[in-house]
Image (cartoon, rainbow, N blue to C red):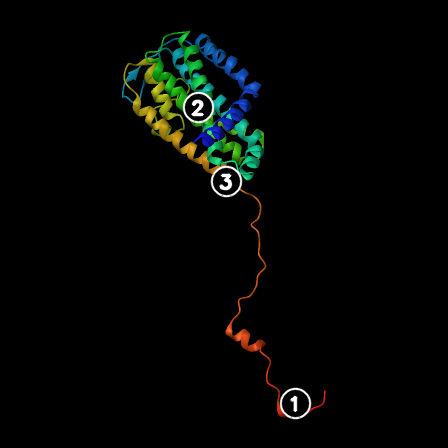
Amino acid sequence: MRRHWSLFSTASRYALIGHARNRFAMLLVVVYIPVWIGLAYVTIPDRLAPFRLRATGEVLSPPGNHLTQITGALNAVTLIAGFMMFAATFTGGAFDRRLAMAGYPRYHLVLAKLAALTLVCAAIAGYATVAVGFSWPPRQPLLLAAALFCAAMTYGALGVVFGSVLRREVEGMFAILMISILDVALQNPLSSSGSDSAVVRFLPTYGAVQAGMSAAFSDASAVQGLVIQCLWLLGAASAGFLVFRRRTGNALPPERRPWVPAPTERAGAESAPEPLSSAERAQPT
């Protein structure tokens, strides 16, 4: 047990150090989240924006700037978590592969990355919830933080998938950016008239958006939204584990043994010398 804990703690330490060295991501966490949320509060009109919340069936009428702050917070945490995990997987893939080929257990590497992702997403979600609370108090701040956390975890797992599959860094950054923008924008009633469409139920952050809206503007429980988001998280995490396992597998070709034909009765009969005739035996050598 002590050996397993030592392997896990060592891998976790390296994973956290890798995140800490990503100074641009740290800058995004510290600056981008409050700036985005603050600009949404100042620039978006505060007129009421009624919409129907599919998770509870309620018709909510929050101010437009408050509504945009929630979707902006979701967009910010998903982008940052996705960028951080993509960068860590993309740049550290060769190192993880060398460790795995040297005998380091891959399960410990995966659990370490999951632990680092959990700590990072918890910090980002808590920070975004506090930033929203400076403008106005959400009805259920803990539920809002849970929704932001689940959304960040989902995109962090997707970042691992993109970091393991895509070959160039710009491809992963563009994929995460476009998916996050389209995902959240289509569910914002101010920017999309089809936010109540049945199609949005298949978007990656549908559950988090439903839970976040309910937590911010209603006293009703939106546990169903969190459950849906956890299903997305489970699927993304499973895909991330599979591609990570495949990428860190042994790429050396298997050792080939020389092919030797198996002996058969016919081959033995053909290789046996034929008996000499009496005339052949009588000839002088």
- Provide residue 47's location: percent of width, then percent of height: 37, 9
Q: Which residue is mark 1?
A: 281
Q: Residues within 10 Å of mark 3 (few under 14, many from 20)?
A: few
Residue 223 left/right relative to 77: left
Q: Which badge, 2 or 3, comes first in the chain's sequence?
A: 2
Give the mark toward the camera: 1 or 2.
Answer: 1
Residue at 38% x, 14% y is: 67
The image quarter containing residue 142 is top left
Residue at 62% x, 92% y is: 278
> With respect to residue 253, does 183 lie above or below?
above
Residue 171 showing in the rendered view: no
Q: Amino acid at mark 1?
A: Arg
Foreground residue among 191 and 261:
261
- Provide residue 193's location: percent of width, then percent of height: 38, 22
- Provide residue 282's location: percent of width, then percent of height: 67, 92
Which SS class for mark 2?
Answer: helix
Q: Quadrant of the C terminus?
A: bottom right
- Whole-angstrom CA distance, mark 1 to mark 2, is 90 Å
Q: Residue furthest right?
A: 285
Q: Which badge, 1 or 2, comes first in the chain's sequence?
A: 2
Q: Which residue is mark 3?
A: 246
Q: Which residue is mark 2?
A: 118
- Provide residue 271's location: percent of width, then percent of height: 58, 76
Foreground residue among 188 and 102:
102
- Whole-angstrom CA distance, mark 2 to mark 3, is 23 Å
Q: Quadrant of the N terminus?
A: top left
Mark 2 and mark 3 residues within 8 Å of each other at the beta carbon: no
Q: Which badge, 3 or 1, comes first in the chain's sequence?
A: 3
Q: Amino acid at mark 3?
A: Arg
